[in-house]
Amino acid sequence: MMNQHRFPRTSLREYDIRGIVGETLSETDAHAVGRGFGTVVRRAGGRTVAVGRDGRLSSPALEAALVEGLLATGCDVVRIGLGPTPMLYYAVKALEAAGGVMVTGSHNPSNFNGFKMTLAERPFWGADIRALGAAAEAGDWESGAGTVHDEDVRARYLNRLLEDVRLPALKVGWDCGNGATGEIVSDLVKRLPGTHHLLFPEIDGRFPNHHPDPTVEANLAPLKALVRDRGLDLGFAFDGDGDRIGAVDGEGRVVWGDQLLLVLATALLRHLPGASIIADVKASRVLFDGVAALGGKPVMWKTGHSLIKAKMLETGAPLAGEMSGHIFFANRWYGFDDAVYAGLRLLEAIGELGRSLAALRDAMPAVVNTPELRFACDDTRKFDVVRQVLDRLRAEGANVDSTDGARVTTADGWWLLRASNTQAVLVARAEAANEPALARLVAEIDRHLEALGVTRSEAAH
């Protein structure tokens, strides 16, 4: 049995532990994750840990090694089997477990895998993950002999998804992308009113039809075609582990994360007037202004699902979301990001508001924006560059919000520059009322970065 373990430097991320299988992620790493997380649970006075896995080809072996590590700390493991990450989060709540670990590569290519961890009462991220790595290097682990058993929570999870949503009869497309939502969604649609069409529900860790990331518009091409060819009202797409949602309206247009959040907030604020709605700094001004106009309290916060969850706990916000398609409900739900549940709540909102998703999108103010602009920048320097840009902006008297990087508001619109928490890049985005104004905003980003020797290259997009 291992007494110490050093994880590859690149695998300890801000929100999870992740790597390329056979290169920066191994079964030995999985065992050490089990020892480390199990130790945290035991020292906090807990014992039971729920474990789930996605459909990647490497997930069964990694799960087996993870479970062995947990058992070696004296934790009792409940294996819930194959399914989406939100089902694991649900199992932690429903089984009253002390924590949970999901073996998943999320929205990454098929050769990636990793571990998302959660404690019963809060997300496990950032300093928690760094401490787990340090403890592994020191061999600072509990020892014991736990038990393991399998528990099928799919029926309970499915019933809970449907427990209190009031759904209209619509024509809906569902693209599971060969990811971990396939079986759940296949069973779900049999119980929904309306007409439903599935794409790629077979769970296949090779992702033979398209990459499992609904935030990249090219991956939504099959869903757009389905909606158009079948005359559907809308369509949903999910990432590899089911915690991110993508959507297409009845006209085949992508409805982005902040636009979905505004539709959901419009319905929710009818029942909870004055509620706080949290969105990350990448979100459109249309969302923040729209929430305020509806009488809600818009809260701009840092990008990252763990950061958003922590802010929800702090503020008591009933709803939050990110541009990346993570949608979080604490109203009638548990506060975690569940793409299938978000889809059901969106159907409910459309029914309640009495307008199609296309009409709701059309009612939003028209703006133009860039995709994410990426600037290659070494991990050792990226945060310093953002600090230097902030200093320059303040010296120029700019209207800047430094919640997460620099979000600058001008007469033309706004632009954002922040350091990625997960990659060696700076990420920028801009939004304006028209193309000439947008070009001026992008020129401003380039001006500040070029002054610091950072330039945008095709390779960094």
Image: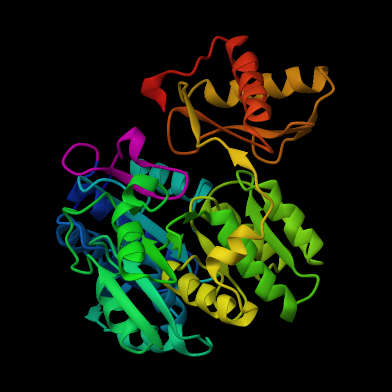
- Give the quadrant of residue 9: top left
Q: Position of residue 329 (x, y in %)?
A: 57, 71
Residue 316 lies within the magenta run: no
Judged left or right of residue 56, residue 330 is: right
In the image, 171 versus 377, the foreground residue is 171
The answer to whether residue 72 is above or below residue 344 is above
The coloring applied to the image is rainbow
Q: Residue at x 30, y 39 (%)?
A: 6
Question: For the magenta stretch, what is the residue range?
Answer: 5-24
The answer to whether residue 71 is above or below residue 37 is below
Residue 22 lies within the magenta run: yes
Magenta segment, prevailing SS (helix, strand or loop):
loop
Judged left or right of residue 377, residue 294 is: right
Judged left or right of residue 444, residue 334 is: left
Q: Position of residue 459 (x, y in %)?
A: 36, 22
In the image, 346 versus 420, the foreground residue is 346
Q: Residue at x 49, y 52 (%)?
A: 125
Q: Residue at x 70, y 69 (%)?
A: 316
The answer to whether residue 389 is above or below residue 225 is above
Q: Position of residue 175 (x, y in %)?
A: 31, 64
In the image, 6 versus 403, the foreground residue is 403
Q: Can the viewer see residue 218?
A: yes
Q: How many marks?
A: 0
